Image: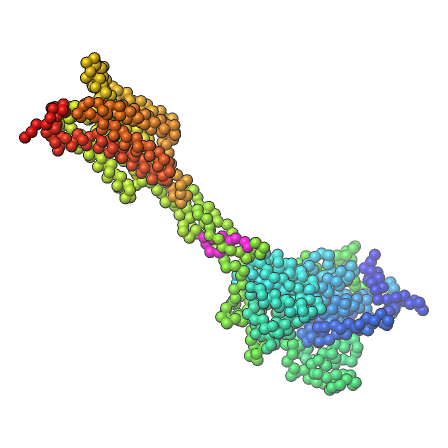
């Protein structure tokens, strides 16, 4: 079905077939405020010229009256007049649409969807009383519409007019929901809210405002912006609260919202709302004296003069707002001041404006002064005549020129090269709106101000905003100052440019406030989210030992590498402290000194025994074994030095082998000495003849055999599971304890067990021989020495197992030294005592018990 026929069918919304005759007649006309100028092609317009709409009460007993509009908006009327100026300017331009006169038909939507929809319907269906052209062969009443400024209005109107591809070019509808191909004939010269939200979020990020409140109007503009804002903010911060302004200006609800703002810890409040929704909230803010808040304004109210009063300055001063791009329109001010009242009902908006500005009335029956129509606008400084900060009006100007350029391209089509079926072109007398849509999608021109106008695949304009700051004007009111720009087409990271030195902050410090739920967690801590609260509310917990965080607000702590540990601040991994029993530390020095002292004492005793080797005391107890025993004790003292110092492979292997062999050699000598004592007693009996079987050669062979067995145990141990250096972190994770791993527990146990076995046998034999009749029975001293030796090594086992790190080596050294000194003192001290201090007892008679010679 042809679009022209579809448009004709749309007339059924407002027409009824007349019973008295042919044709289609208007059933009823809407009472709309508007302006009109005829032309070859007419563009429609929808503007917010009044703030409020009053609907009559419905009695259902009589036909309801038409709604009325109140509170004239001078800025909105300026936008409507800008469209009239743009069309007049185009008509004078010989290069744009030559030989075509443009007209306009503008309506006031009164900021109500019901009124806006009636106006849109009136534009597409026309206002003639009857329609005789039932074929709809001519052009429609309007070829395109500038507006509506409201997002909700644009959605509703586009859903209907989009069915007939009537182009709608809005200058103020920013809802991101309109960037959808379900609105194929919708275009706009203002960026989508998606870009506005990004601009706001970048401001929040610039000042680290991660905890913000959100207030939106209860319409498509506010609700869609809220969804986009929540999504964008969630990437770096949180929304402390989100409130929707009531549609009916309910004072109770407004008061509740202000209470929420007051109780919240968020100091930054973002507001997406139109003026009509926001006015009651600002009034309540004044009543409740709510200050010390940083307001972030959306473009719908960032530059609205309604809020620029002395009363609101203490509360809204310092507001940062996103404003649509400011422009300049040469000649607009002169045009605005040149208008005069027109008593044509189709142009009643001019008369209403006149009455508002001069406080008079054209109705003779009205009280007050009567308007003459000759009043001068020259001395009136109002939002209508102020062209220093053109934003909405500049977008209207661009929207009109976009339609005009698209129409110019449409009429400049070369026959046979057109884009329509059969390569046809459009004709002026039969223009269709869908034909204009085709060229609107491709329009591309530059305004006299230097801004490029074009639309992307979603009908959106290029995103560029001014960042505004509300500052105190000389007269005490609010003035908006441009302090930055947001350009979506700029390189990444440079979209937002702010002149921070020119920003006024409405706080005592004149500095930006802090608005965070929780202070950032310093390095060395991690964030722990509070249960039931947003992610921006958290506690800072110190990292565990061995873990660090070297960034602010880290969500996790990372483990240090195996050989590293966290420093006390938990913000850096440092090499672990290496611990081993060192020659430089006091404990190591002490043990080394004692070890060397023991070796020196053994050497001294050995030298005494060598010097007095022919004396009875030395000869009576097998001097050869005594010498070997002293030599082995020297080795025992010296082998303890292998347990001190940083473990190496060779020291780990040698320390236990040297210890085991030295002690076996020592115990073997003692065992053989004990056997000799027992054998000597047996030989003293009349029938005793055992000593010939256990002479010096047998004694040496026995010591060697016992020692070889230990050497075999050590060899097997070292070849199968050799001890090796080991980094032990089991006792203290913050330290690397260098120690020698025994390799094989069985090998180590065999080594100690064999020593213990020989010691036990020696103790048993010596204990049995302790009371043998001999004036100098060595078995008594061996018994005592073995008792000391066994006690030390029995106590060694639990102490060694429970000692951490280097102290296990110290325990083993202590056991070696203690047992060695026990053997040295118990066996050799009595003999040295006689040799050195009582040489008179070092005689054969004394040893035989025949008395000591007197002097």
Image quarter (top left, top right, bottom left or bottom right) of the N terminus: bottom right
Residue 312 located left or right of residue 730: right
Residue 235 in the image: state x and y as whole percent.
Answer: 57, 55
User: In this rendering, is residue 234 above or below 295?
Assistant: above
The magenta segment:
521-530
Q: Quadrant of the C terminus?
A: top left
Q: Quadrant of residue 490?
A: bottom right
- At horizontal 53% and vertical 61% (from top left) the residue drawn is 516
Is residue 47 in view? no
User: Which residue is at the front of the view, 455 or 559?
Assistant: 559
In reply to whether residue 358 is colored magenta, the answer given is no
Residue 372 position, x and y percent, is 74, 86
Q: Is residue 78 left or right of residue 695?
A: right
Measured from the top left, where is residue 675 in percent x and y? 24, 21
Number of residue marks: 0
Residue 550, image x, y percentages: 45, 52
Q: Residue at x 23, y 39 (%)?
A: 593
> Image quarter for residue 753?
top left
Q: Nearer the viewer, residue 128 or 268?
A: 268
Looking at this view, name the residue that lies furthest to the right: 20
Q: Kindly identify the residue that appears in the image at 18 percent across and 23 percent down.
A: 774
Figure check: 367 above or below 665: below
Residue lying farthest left?
Answer: 855
Residue at the spot x=28%, y=44% of the render?
Answer: 586
**Is residue 745 in view from this perspective?**
yes
């Amino acid at each position: 079905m042809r679009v022209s026929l579809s448009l004709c069918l749309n007339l059924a919304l407002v027409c009824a077939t007349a019973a008295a005759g042919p044709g289609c007649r208007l059933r009823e006309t809407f009472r709309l405020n508007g302006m009109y100028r005829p032309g070859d092609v007419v563009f429609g317009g929808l503007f917010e010229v009044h703030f409020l709409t009053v609907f009559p009460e419905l009695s259902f007993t009589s036909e309801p009256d038409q709604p009325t509009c109140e509170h004239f908006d001078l800025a909105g009327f300026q936008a409507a007049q800008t469209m009239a100026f743009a069309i007049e300017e185009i008509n004078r331009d010989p290069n744009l649409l030559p030989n075509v006169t443009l007209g306009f038909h503008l309506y006031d939507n009164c900021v109500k969807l019901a009124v806006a929809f009636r106006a849109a319907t009136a534009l597409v269906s026309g206002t003639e009383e009857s329609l005789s052209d039932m074929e709809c062969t001519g052009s429609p009443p309007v070829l395109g519409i500038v507006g509506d400024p409201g997002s909700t209005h644009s959605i509703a109107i586009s859903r209907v007019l989009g069915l007939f591809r009537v182009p709608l070019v809005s200058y103020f509808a920013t809802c991101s929901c309109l960037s959808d191909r379900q609105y194929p004939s919708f275009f706009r010269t203002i960026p989508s809210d998606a870009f506005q939200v990004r601009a706001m979020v970048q401001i929040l990020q610039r000042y680290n405002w991660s905890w913000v409140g959100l207030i939106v109007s209860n319409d498509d503009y506010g609700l869609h912006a809220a969804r986009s804002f929540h999504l964008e903010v969630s990437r770096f911060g949180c929304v402390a609260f989100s409130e929707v302004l009531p549609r009916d200006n309910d004072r109770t609800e407004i008061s509740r919202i202000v209470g929420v703002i007051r109780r919240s810890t968020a100091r930054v409040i973002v507001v997406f709302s139109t003026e009509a929704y926001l006015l009651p909230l600002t009034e309540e803010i004044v009543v409740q004296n709510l200050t010390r808040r940083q307001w972030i304004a959306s473009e719908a109210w960032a530059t609205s003069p309604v809020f620029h009063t002395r009363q609101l300055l203490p509360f809204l001063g310092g507001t940062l707002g996103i404003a649509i791009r400011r422009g300049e329109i040469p000649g607009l001010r002169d045009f605005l001041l040149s208008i005069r009242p027109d008593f044509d009902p189709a142009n009643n908006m001019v008369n209403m404006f006149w009455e508002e500005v001069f406080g008079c009335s054209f109705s003779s029956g009205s009280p007050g002064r009567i308007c003459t129509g000759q009043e001068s606008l020259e001395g009136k400084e109002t939002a209508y005549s102020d062209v220093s900060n053109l934003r909405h009006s500049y977008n209207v100007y661009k929207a009109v020129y976009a339609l005009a350029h698209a129409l110019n391209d449409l009429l400049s089509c070369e026959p046979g090269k057109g884009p329509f079926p059969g390569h046809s072109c459009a004709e002026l007398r039969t223009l269709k709106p869908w034909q204009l849509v085709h060229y609107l999608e491709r329009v591309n021109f530059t305004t006299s101000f230097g801004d490029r106008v074009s639309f992307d695949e979603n009908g959106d304009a290029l995103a560029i905003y001014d960042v505004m700051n509300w500052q105190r004007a000389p007269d005490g009111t609010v003035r908006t100052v441009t302090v930055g720009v947001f350009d979506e087409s700029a390189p990444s990271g440079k979209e937002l440019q702010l002149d921070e030195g020119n920003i006024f902050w409405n706080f005592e410090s004149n500095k930006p406030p802090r608005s965070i739920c929780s202070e950032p967690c310093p390095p060395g801590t991690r964030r722990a989210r509070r249960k039931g609260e947003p992610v921006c509310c958290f506690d800072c917990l110190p990292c565990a030992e061995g873990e660090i965080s070297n960034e602010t607000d880290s969500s996790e702590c990372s483990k240090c590498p195996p050989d590293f540990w966290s420093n006390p601040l938990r913000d850096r991994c440092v090499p672990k402290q290496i611990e081993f029993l060192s020659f430089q530390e006091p404990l190591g020095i002490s043990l080394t000194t004692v070890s060397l002292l023991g070796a020196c004492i053994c050497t001294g005793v050995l030298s005494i025994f060598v010097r007095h080797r022919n004396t009875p005391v030395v000869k009576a107890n097998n001097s050869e074994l005594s010498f070997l025993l002293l030599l082995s004790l020297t080795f025992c003292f010296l082998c303890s030095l292998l347990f001190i110092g940083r473990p190496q492979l060779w020291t780990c292997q040698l320390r236990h082998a040297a210890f085991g062999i030295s002690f076996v050699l020592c115990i073997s000598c003692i065992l053989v000495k004990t056997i000799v004592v027992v054998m000597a007693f047996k030989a003293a009996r009349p029938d005793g003849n055992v000593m010939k079987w256990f002479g010096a050669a047998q004694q040496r062979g026995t010591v060697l055999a016992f020692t070889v067995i230990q050497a075999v145990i050590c060899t097997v141990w070292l070849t199968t599971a050799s001890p090796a250096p080991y980094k032990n972190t089991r006792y203290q994770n913050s330290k690397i304890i260098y120690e020698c791993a025994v390799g094989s527990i069985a090998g180590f146990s065999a080594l100690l067990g064999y020593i213990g076995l020989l010691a036990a046998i020696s103790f048993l034999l010596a204990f049995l021989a302790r009371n043998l009749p001999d004036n100098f029975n060595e078995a008594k001293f061996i018994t005592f020495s073995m008792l000391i030796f066994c006690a030390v090594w029995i106590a060694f086992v639990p102490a060694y197992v429970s000692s951490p790190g280097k102290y296990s080596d110290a325990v083993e050294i202590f056991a070696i030294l203690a047992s060695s000194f026990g053997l040295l003192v118990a066996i050799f001290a009595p003999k040295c005592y006689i040799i050195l201090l009582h040489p008179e007892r070092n005689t054969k008679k004394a040893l035989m018990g025949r008395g000591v010679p007197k002097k």
